[in-house]
Amino acid sequence: MQFTLEVNGRAHTVDVDEDTPLLWVLRDEIGLKGTKFGCGAGLCGACTVHLNGAPTRSCSVPVSAVANAAVTTIEGIGDIPAGAQLQKAWLDVDVVQCGYCQAGQIMSAAALLARTPTPNDDDIISAMNGNICRCGTYLRIHEAIKRAAKTSLGSTITKQRT
Amino acid sequence: MLRKCLSANSTDRSSPNDIAGNAPTGRTSRRGFLKATGTAAGGMLLALRFPTLAKAAASGAAQKTSAALTAFVNIAPDNVVTIVAKNPEIGQGVKTMLPMLIAEELDVDWAQVRVKQADLDPALYGNQHAGGSTATPQNWDPLRRVGAAARQMLVEAAAKRWNVATDECATASGQVLHRASNRALPYGVLAEDAAILSVPPLKSVKLKDPKDYKIIGHSIPGVDSPLVVKGEPLFGIDTVVPGMLYAVFEKCPVFGGKVVSANVDEIVKLPGVRHAFVVEGTTNLNGLMPGIAIVADSLWRAEKARGKLKVSWNGGSTSQQSSAGFARQAAELSTKTPERSLRNDGDTAAALGSAAKVVEANYSYPFIAHAALEPMNCTARVQDSKIEIWAPTQNPDPGRKLVAQTLGLNERDIIVHMTRTGGGFGRRLATDYMVEAAWITRAAGVPVKLVWNRADDIRHDFYRPGGFHFLKGGLDANGKAVAWEQHFISYGRNGKFAPSADLSPDTFPANRIANLSYGVSLIPLGVPTGPLRAPGDNALAFVYQSFIDELADAAGKDPLQFQIDLLGKDELLPGKGPGFNTARVRGVLEKVREVSGWGQHKLPQRTGKGVAVYYSHLGYFAEVVEVTVANNGTIKINKVWAVGDIGSHVINPTAAYNMVQGAILDGFAEALHQQITIEGGRVLQANFDTFPLLRMAQAAPIEVHFLQTDNPPTGLGEPPLPAAIPALCNAIYAATGKRIRSLPIDAAMLKA
């Protein structure tokens, strides 16, 4: 069955079974490998993408349910200021160990910053608790989100002054 | 002994930005690396050259191009230096750390460096595996020499060009300098000349004075991280081969079970399915097990078809095994004399008889899985009876051997590419998924990507074996430990321990308690076991360090001081590697006492601190954990202080702090949550709902300190983990008076 999806602002037409999870459409039909398979059951968050800005586990959403939604993946999140700031903060803090979960982590964090630009510790934990990092880089993930949030605030102030 | 202490707490981590300009890998050197199929004789230290390269460089090809000085170092005319990372990257940071060793002695700026992952080629690169925290101790010396050798070749090339003596030349930041004449040449200009020189014997090259290090000891961020945060394809599961199909492989849920019959004729007719067939397999639990392969045009269609599989299995004798049954057998064996004595010092029975106080306790821990976040997967392509493999693996060479043996191929007809790996933890030392992919691609005659689902991963692992320990400790009237009797009931057959189910007779406090006996009895096991991060130690530390804490408590002594007293005089006792160094144990204990404010503060009710120390994989760690246990039994870890002694250098501090924190959190996950339950010879758990991993809410702040001592540097994958578990359990005891003797921790028993 044919579906047309808007992914990172571009339309893609794919021909797949209607129950195919969005995860596999992104990875194997459209070729965006950044979204990762971890559990297939919405338990680990490695496959997190945004549907109309909301963090969503792409392993548990059939492609037929997203045909009219705007999908953002890790490959596109850098086009959004919060996404770019998070990616930079991730490098500045040197978060990554194996790196497999980090795309999903950044996607959950970007959704958090979009609705809560200056999150406190509890905000961060409740937004991120669904994303497993098997290597245990949580302390640095937490730190990177705080750092990105500060950057974000800084850029807002700069804009107001000009 | 102690030279200095490096520290970082959870909020003030060493900045990775002190070396600028790190760039991702990806620049491919044009000639050399991929042609390296033949090799010179000898090990890594000799076979530094691709046989064809010197000639290529000597032929004076008109086109200016990069030049391979050795198999590890390639320098382009623009002075970009490409360094080969020889070992698999599984998140432990070796793809950055090992090239740092070469770059330091090559005397280049890290900003010039690009890193390229090696394919499997042990004749060129030596041992290429990731396991046992061995990358640092095995490569610290040779890879610095590899860098120094290339530097020496560049100096020689410059000296020839200038017609001066080599000892008049110096190097700095990727240039050879002749200060007397104020001349300098970048390495990139000299590389082609240097590449035709012979590689000096590595033993003879001169190494830097460590005080001049500009890279070693400075934080360098992970070389792949810029690609990771953008979601670029790096991992095994991201591999794409033209014409590739997707494979799933269903094995018997009972370990070692065989296929009696399966409805593959129906499966092959399902949408998208191209092949479905029974794999007879072998009887090697670490190899190709029997099962059914389904190959389809998408992974989803392969999985859907798998849902319609009807298989009749013969589970064999393992289907009689269960965790509950093992516990019953252990209880029964504990009433008998151990089958075998591992160690018997003095007269333990008499010493226990005359002791002022005897402490008796039984400890147990379950099987646990690895649950690396990237599920097992492997891509394989068959072509002209040769096989090319892209594998996220810790163990590429044994993987190739297994494929060769199982498929009846020559090793030289199998190419193995090592991809970045989404976590190893020991699981990917086994190479079962590699041989499955290789078998399926050959049987189907098409390239395939085999992907396991999470249930496959949890249910077909090589588990950390469970174990049971029955202990008695005796104290004299002064509270000194005078007797230790231990009956370890483990798994194995015919006196041989199952993999990772063993106990060394030198395990501390052996050699420090005069009357000490270690006895062993074994339960036969049909469940595959294997190394999990800090194998052996991840379980034994819990038992030993908890029971020592019990003895301290019974003696009415401070647990940390009791540990120090138990060490006795500074001495090298028999043990792994160079031995168990009581001075180094004392060093980390003293330091953790200081940084944790041990005994300095009165803690609130149901809040307590616990301490533990362990020597694991050549590294020493002492850790203090502070917990608060709520009245309903909920455990909150408030803070962790960790002190490590991994020798004279912490090569990449940013990665080191990260690794210590991750390993400690890994230990907490094991202690708080994890167990694999065997029933009817199969595993009950299947995903992260039943086999939970630690989440951010449970990630306590962890302050990390390193003592730098005059010992060879060693790795960090394993050493910080073992002490975390008993330190946590001992803290819970301090907070509640309840002793944790069985894992995972049962919060219900901690209610007020």
Image (spheres, coloured by chain):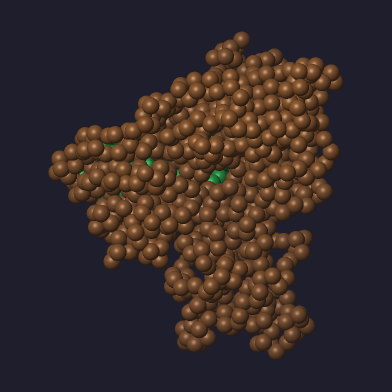
Chain colours: A green, B brown
Given residues A17 and B689, the one toward you in this image is B689
Q: What is the quadrant of residue B376 in the picture?
A: top left
- Please name the residue shown 15% across and 43% down the image: B265
- Please name the residue shown 19% across and 42% down the image: B264
Q: What is the quadrant of residue B682 in the picture?
A: top left
- Percent x, y for residue B472? 69, 22
Residue B143 makes an appearance in the image? yes
Query: Relative to residue B360, is residue B202 depicted above or below?
Result: below
- Percent x, y for residue A39? 38, 36
Q: Is residue B456 left or right of residue B520?
A: left
- Percent x, y for residue B579? 72, 46
Residue B664 makes an appearance in the image? no
Quadrant of the drawing holding the C terminus of chain B: top right
Q: Is residue B333 left or right of residue A31?
A: right
Given residues B252 and B320, the one toward you in this image is B320
Q: Tally the numbered discs.
A: 0
Given residues B263 and B139, the one toward you in this image is B263
- Please name the residue shown 70% across and 89% down the image: B163
Given residues B549 and B596, the one toward you in this image is B549
Q: What is the quadrant of residue B573 in the picture?
A: top right
- Percent x, y for residue B44? 57, 66
Work out which residue is located at the far top of the displayed protein and give it.
Answer: B752
